[in-house]
Amino acid sequence: MSDLLELLEQRTSARESGEIPAALGPMLEELSRAFACDRALIALYHPDRQLLSGSLGRNIPRDYAEALEIPLSDATDPSVTAFRSGVPQRVEDAATDPRIRQHIREVLVELALERFLVAPLLGASEAVGVVLLSRAAPFSESDVDALMPLTNRAGAELARARDVERLRDTSESTAIQQGWLWLMINSVADPVLVSDEQNEIILQNRRAELLFRVNPEDSPGRKHAVTMNNFLFTAALSTWNLQRGERSPTRELTLVDPTEGSELSFEVIAQPATNYRLGAGGRGMVAVLKNVTDLRNVTEELSRNVLRLQSADQEIRTERDRLDLILRSVPNPIIVIDNDNQIITTNEAAQRVFGGEKRPLAEGRAAETALRNNAKFTSFLAQLRLDPATRKAGELALIDPTTSEALEMVVTATEIQDQLGAVVAVVAVLQDVGRLRELERRRLEQALFESEKLAATGRLAASIAHEINNPLEAIQNSLYLLVNKVPNDDPNYKFLEIAMKETQRMSRILRQMLGFYRPAASMGPTDVNALIDEAEALVVKRLRDRKIGLRKSLDGALPPIQASADQLKQVILNLLLNAAEAMGEGGTIDLETRVYRDARAPFLRAEAVQILIRDTGAGIDEEHMPHIFEPFFSTKGERGTGLGLWVSSGIVQAHGGTLQVRSRPGIGTTFSITLPIAGPPSDADGR
Ligand SMILES: Nc1ncnc2c1ncn2[C@@H]1O[C@H](COP(=O)(O)OP(=O)(O)O)[C@@H](O)[C@H]1O
Ligand SMILES: [Mg+2]
């Protein structure tokens, strides 16, 4: 390209210096010699300036010659007349000739052209200038006739030279234009290519050369890449030509960067073009390749990011829905508040108490109550915030706006911190403990009532027993006396027997009652294992009759406990008899004693002893379980008094211990008596 520029520059400077057609010199020489002229001058016609201008002289220096300029508008001037009419004109004395304008006269005098013949130089179709011939001798008619063929030939030659010149000028301007076009095309940042009908590249700009032109000094890698690109481009063009029907002017093409080896994405704008100078063979394509690699990468990255964002968004949404669901289904009011005590979110339970979007505040009292709740909560939170702990709790009395019931709320506020440890929100969970407390209170009341009822019944029963005991003893004594007086075969004897039996039963019941109610004063160190042996001795015959086995595993190291031995023996006896009665024939009763520790029960923090009585009997029905310790509850009809367990539990409690039962119907029952070694705590004595 730079060669072209240089050439252009050379030509431009040559033109500026005003080059004269080369044929002019010899022509002038020939004319001068033929007519023995000492001076001669050729003035050429300049169509652009409409004048005849001195170009070359004989015996006239060039810059002098060039001083002569005769405008064609000087109609009378002999030179103009000769040029226009084609007829040579004679000038005898240029200094005075009135046809010549003054300043031209002066120039002619200056050039020493006072006396001359001016003849036209005629080309094929037009005059190209005039020649001024000057000599001392005048020009005859025959001279002029002889001159004409010569000037005509000179004119034709000049005209031809001028044509050549003109042609050269046009090709030169074409070259200049081509030069600019090249500059233009090369300054395009995108590769621009022209391909022929075979889709081979025939012309390309600099940018395209980087991709498609092999240079001898290129590395094999680059050469390979360039060959590859040429192939790819040609192949792509061929494919697109085949799909001409559905063509869009832009197509995509992936090439190889010959320097980096990386992939380049191009958008190809290909337009068919025909070079008419070549006729039908001049069909080809002009293609502009737009590099969209970066655009493509960015677009891909962008769409990947969009996808990622979308899925993250979805995840967040799902997570939020899940949280919402959890929040909604939690019955406790939950409120999330920001640092300015503004509510961020609440669940439905909270809106019930404080009002909110889901439960717009109704007019009137409910709305007022909700507002008051809000105010209380806010000031409570402000108070709570003073506590440095991140998790704090306190109690707050609110009112249910719907039912106007008092709500005893335990508020647990947990601070949410960001990565830097700054508190960004507080989650407050409220729990209505009022209802729980009410339930607990009722349960306690019920239990108290039950135990008081039992105690009252017990006291009543005991006082009745006491009152009845004396008269009953009198009746028994009387009956005893009567039995000894009435012979066995007396018909009334059996009535006496019935009376005896029933009074004995009555006294047994009374004894049980009184035994239980005897004051605990008689407590002393008691050997529990020995008590068990004594109780066993009392029932051993009965057990043997009913083929019931008795297994004892007594802890020999059992410490003596502070207890009433008589009462404890009665308890063990009661439980043994119940076990036997639950078994019918066969089966085994296990008796076990052991030292017992239970840190959970405060009164047993001291060591305790435990007596376990396990049977393989019928078990206790679940529906009977709550009642077995009640007085007079019995499933044994006439045979039972329903006092055994009632009295036993009373005795155990009087000792500061517990009587517990576990039973599985059809498998067996275990009663366990747990007694503190030290006896009852002092406040248990008063019973
Ligand atoms: N070891 C046991 N196995 C099955 N049921 C029992 C046992 N101990 C007590 N019971 C049930 O508890 C009830 C109350 O017992 P208790 O107070 O001793 O009265 P009674 O023995 O006079 O019926 C019994 O009627 C019986 O239903
Ligand atoms: Mg009993």
Image: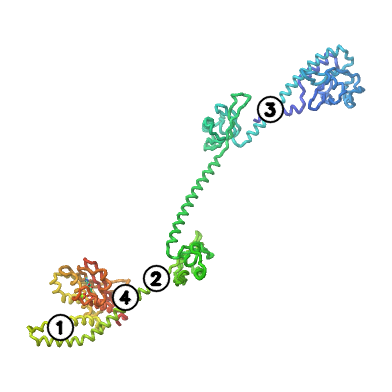
Quarter occupied by residue 534: bottom left
Which mark is nearer the camera, 4 or 2? 2
Q: CA distance from mark 2 to mark 1?
A: 56 Å
Secondary structure beneath disc 4?
Answer: helix
Which of pointers 2 and 3 lies earlier in the amino acid sequence? 3
* Residue closest to the far right: 96
Could you say which disc has been placed on residue 499 in the image?
Answer: 1
Which of pointers 4 and 2 lies earlier in the amino acid sequence? 2
Quarter occupied by residue 453: bottom left
Q: Position of residue 36 (x, y in %)?
A: 85, 14
Which of pointers 1 and 4 lies earlier in the amino acid sequence? 1
Q: Quadrant of the C terminus?
A: bottom left
Q: Badge 3, how many Cα within 10 Å: few under 14, some, many 20+?
A: few
Instruction: Name the residue tied to disc 2.
Output: 436
Q: CA distance from mark 1 to mark 3?
A: 158 Å
Q: Is mark 2 within 8 Å of ligand 1?
A: no
Q: CA distance from mark 1 to mark 4?
A: 47 Å
Which of pointers 1 and 3 lies earlier in the amino acid sequence? 3
Which of pointers 4 and 3 lies earlier in the amino acid sequence? 3
Q: Position of residue 405 (x, y in %)?
A: 45, 72
Secondary structure beneath disc 1?
Answer: helix
Front in this rendered view, residue 346 or 135:
346
Q: CA distance from mark 4 to mark 3?
A: 123 Å
Could you say which disc has been placed on residue 174 in the image?
Answer: 3
Question: Can residue 39 be seen from the camera position used here?
Answer: no
Q: In the rendered picture of this protein, how many numbered marks are placed on residues?
A: 4
- Cβ–Cβ under 8 Å for marks 1 and 4: no
Secondary structure beneath disc 3?
Answer: helix
Which of pointers 2 and 1 lies earlier in the amino acid sequence? 2
Type of amino acid under label 1: Ala
Q: Quadrant of the N terminus?
A: top right
